[in-house]
Amino acid sequence: MNFYEYRTLFRVVTLALLLIVSFAFFTSVFPIPETGERFFALALLGSGKMAENYFPRNNSTLMLNEEIKWYVEVYNYVPAIQYLCVAIKLINSSIAGPDSVNCVPSSSNYELMNITTFLTYGRSVMVPFVWKLSNVTLNGNSYVINQIRINNVTLPTNIRAINGTSFRFVFELWQFSNTSRSFQFAWESGFGLRCAWTQLLFDFGH
Amino acid sequence: MPTQAQVDEDGAEEALVRAESMLISAFDSVLEAEKMGFDATILSEELTRAGGHLTSALLLFKSHNFTLAKWNADICYTIAQSTKAESISLIDYPSLFSRFKQFYIEILSYILVCCAIILASVFSWNFFKRKYLKKVLKMHPEAVLT
């Protein structure tokens, strides 16, 4: 290496150091804005907090007072704190479920409870959902769920299904909108309207 | 657990509305604090705790257990109220002033670090140059660097 090459090396090293310090400073003071999709995720997990073992004996035909333990998990990937609510509904196969294409929720008449949570960006929450059918009666050829026990609270219901088949729990994610000052089922993702919901079917054993 | 007398449906409903309204108000304050650059993680956990009581209150209300529903709604209200106060205290004048101070300290530190790098580079170059020239001249005294 000659003298001039050494001089160039010194200049390059100095410039590189200045660039590293400048990059670190500007990214800490002026964070790079998020440009990706803004979304929430909703998951329903089984008793082992995995996407399996939703029902005892892996059989979705339930008996009276058979306890089921699920977990409702919600993620926030919208870059701000969010006020979220999971509406839990019990319906049968003849009642319309949510519409993912147009982001229309199912009827609020069948809402049993809701889970309220607040999440900052990148955070998630997992809430246990323990339930059992505590009062079911036969009416003609339909079974009617009169009472359901959720998280140690007994709730009155009046949902029926022919032969006790295809009852379903629907879980819908609702977001509190700061502009409308109310909960809405769909959110603006930056790539169009999005909504999140899931469901699990079960039968009543007889 | 509640020790008060039985609560009627209206009393429980009133407590629920009050709690829900306070929760929204606390959420607004936390959102404001987050926009100002404060980390809202702990405050959001407090709000979730309040929300958990609201969930229980609504569930108990539906099961006609109005006393317990009101009790949970009141706890929700208290937690939300204190979270709101905490977030307001974050965005008050002294804390904002301290954040501006911190911002200027960061800029000053950046300028100082840049100056230090440039000075260190100049001094080390001059030191290296002297050594280098001394070495070259010792080897070839007749050589003169142009």
Image (cartoon, helix red, strand yellow):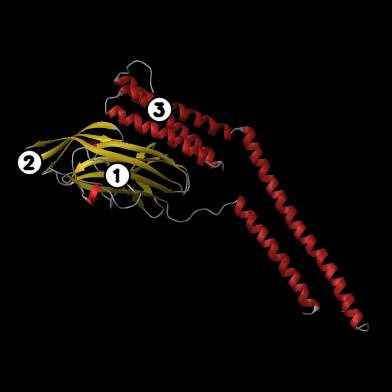
Check disc 2: other Cα within 10 Å, few if <14, some if 14-19, many if 20+. few
Specify whether B89 is left or right of A20: left
Q: Which residue is denoted by mark 3 in the rendering?
A: B19
Marks 3 and 2, Cα distance to the nearest angstrom?
44 Å
Residue at the front extreme?
A: A57
Determine the chain carrying the residue at label 2. Answer: A
- How far from the left and from the top, in percent, is residue A97? 23, 46
Residue at the left extreme?
A: A140
- For the residue marked with disc 3, what is the amino acid? Ala
Callout 1: helix, strand or loop? strand
Q: Which residue is denoted by mark 1 in the rendering?
A: A171
Q: Give the residue drawn at x 10%, y 37%.
A: A138
Residue closer to the observer: A55 or B104: A55
- How far from the left and from the top, in percent, is residue A134? 21, 34
Check disc 1: other Cα within 10 Å, few if <14, some if 14-19, many if 20+. many
> On the image, which quarter does residue A27 sit in?
bottom right
Marks 2 and 1, Cα distance to the nearest angstrom?
28 Å
- Mark drawn on residue A141: 2
Specify whether B113 is left or right of A151: right
Q: Is residue A204 above or below residue B132?
A: above
> On the image, which quarter does residue B55 sit in?
top left
Which tag is nearer the camera, tag 2 or tag 1?
2
Q: In this view, does A148 lie above or below A30?
A: above
- How far from the left and from the top, in percent, is residue A105? 27, 44
- How far from the left and from the top, in percent, is residue A129? 32, 40
Q: Is residue B131 visible?
A: yes
Check disc 3: other Cα within 10 Å, few if <14, some if 14-19, many if 20+. many
